[in-house]
Amino acid sequence: MGLFDFLGVHPILAVGLECALFAVIGSILSQLVFAKKNQRWDVSNMMSMASFSLLWYAPPAFYWYPLLESWYPGTENTSFIVYKLLLDQLLFSLYVLSSFWFHSTFVSTLNLQQSIAAVSNNLFASLLSNWCYWPFVQIINIMYVPVEYKILVLNIASIPWNMYCSYSVSQQNAKATSSPTKSPSKKKKKKKPKKDD
């Protein structure tokens, strides 16, 4: 069950549109809170967040949570809850954050090497931030939310997280644009001392 089921489109596309909507909401709120006064709307940030959620996050998430539930069904077994939480936070979060930094950097630079470097530079810090927030959300989601509503609940909980991600990307882009590109310096020719007659 999702917000766009009434459109009658494929369930993965409906989930993708829902995830993209909440990503845009997070980007808008981030700009309202953190952007400087009279600063223009960063439409590229909104498009980057939305396209990531639509293309990279939603399709795997559509299958991931039912898969976890099929491996470790129910919530009566405490060990099953722990397994689902660990797999989600160690495997799926690793994929989501790696692809997020790769995608958000690539769409702004179209540079493969910079995109890979962005993953290397930001992944660990993002994982630490992720583990400060999402495990608590996922415990509630795993224990109390039916499978068909899990992604919707995650999307609602993702609003502050999307604000954080949107802000992080904007800061990275700002640093990239503000850093001056070094032009090759011309060597000055040394003047030869004039000989006295």
Image (spheres, rainbow, N blue to C red):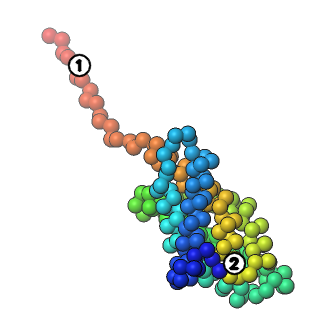
Residue 124 placement: quadrant: bottom right
Residue 114 in the image: x percent, y percent? 45, 58
Camera-near label (2 vs 1) is 2
Q: Nearer the viewer, residue 76 or 4?
A: 4
- Mark 2 vs 1: CB contact within 8 A: no
At x 70%, y 82%, the residue is: 147
Q: Which residue is mark 1?
A: 193
Vertical comparison of 181 with 121: above or below: above
Tell me the crowding category of disc 1: few under 14, some 14 to 19, or many 20 or more residues within 10 angstroms, Cα based.
few
Residue 137 in sight in this render: yes
Q: Which residue is mark 2?
A: 149
Residue 94 in the image: x percent, y percent? 62, 70
> Relative to residue 49, is residue 189 drawn left or right?
left
Residue 91 in sight in this render: no
Vertical comparison of 83 with 35: above or below: below
Q: Nearer the viewer, residue 28 or 5?
A: 5
Q: Mark 2 and mark 1: span between their CA atoms?
A: 83 Å
Kind of residue sitting beneath label 2: Tyr
Tell me the crowding category of disc 2: few under 14, some 14 to 19, or many 20 or more residues within 10 angstroms, Cα based.
few
Secondary structure beneath dot 2 equals helix
Secondary structure beneath dot 1 equals loop
Q: Counting residues from the N terminus, which is met first, the one under dot 2 or under dot 1?
A: 2
> Relative to residue 170, is residue 186 drawn left or right?
left
At x 66%, y 73%, the residue is: 152
Q: Nearer the viewer, residue 11 or 100?
A: 11
